[in-house]
Amino acid sequence: MKPTKKTRRTDHAERLIAAPLVDVFAAFTSADKLARWLPPEGATGAFEHCDLRAGGGFRLRLAFDDPEVETKSDDDSDVVEVHIPTLDEGRLIVWEVEFESDDPRFSGTMAMHWYLSRKGGGTLVTIDAHHVPPGISAKDHEAGLNSSLANLAAVVETASK
């Protein structure tokens, strides 16, 4: 499929987290922590498989509390298959994300680049999501990314105290 402007959209979010970079990175390599922070507000996640290393990946089913949320995979959930080509401790985590959906608006691979850098005694986490499927609204995606970052902060800031 030839990329179009709609499939080339990049969404961005960032948050300064009051925790050491090593603790933030650990939240990307612990299935327990990842399941607690990655699902946005109003959703819970369950791994169908999980191998959080470079070359590995995971399959995550997100279930939503609100039955009115439009889901991509079935009547009440989104399923994502994630390949992890890059896991550079303390710098960059790359996820190649594919949504399980029959709807062509959610097809293709979204590349999520998570940048970690030390800043002001904490860790700046920056997300660039490239090739966001056109079925995901920019407003909803921004809210979801920011919600996941808030969850990440809650998980690692509590553990760092």
Image (cartoon, helix red, strand yellow):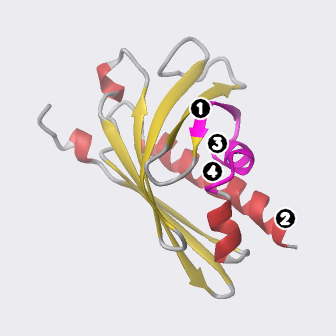
Taking the view exactly as shown, the residue that stands out farthest to the bottom is: 120
Q: Which mark is residue 158?
A: 2
Residue 2 appears in which quarter of the rendering?
top left
Mark 3 or 1, closer to the camera: 1
Q: Which residue is mark 3?
A: 40
Q: Are marks 4 and 1 in contact (CB under 8 Å)?
A: no
- Amino acid carrying label 1: it is His
Q: Which residues are magenta?
A: 28-50
- Amino acid carrying label 3: it is Pro
Q: Residue at x 29, y 21 (%)?
A: 104
Q: Are marks 3 and 4 in contact (CB under 8 Å)?
A: yes
Q: Residues within 10 Å of mark 2 (few under 14, many from 20)?
A: few
Mark 4 or 1, closer to the camera: 1
Q: Which residue is mark 1?
A: 49
Label whose residue precedes the other's in the sequence (3 or 2): 3
Relative image position of residue 37 (x, y in whole percent):
69, 49
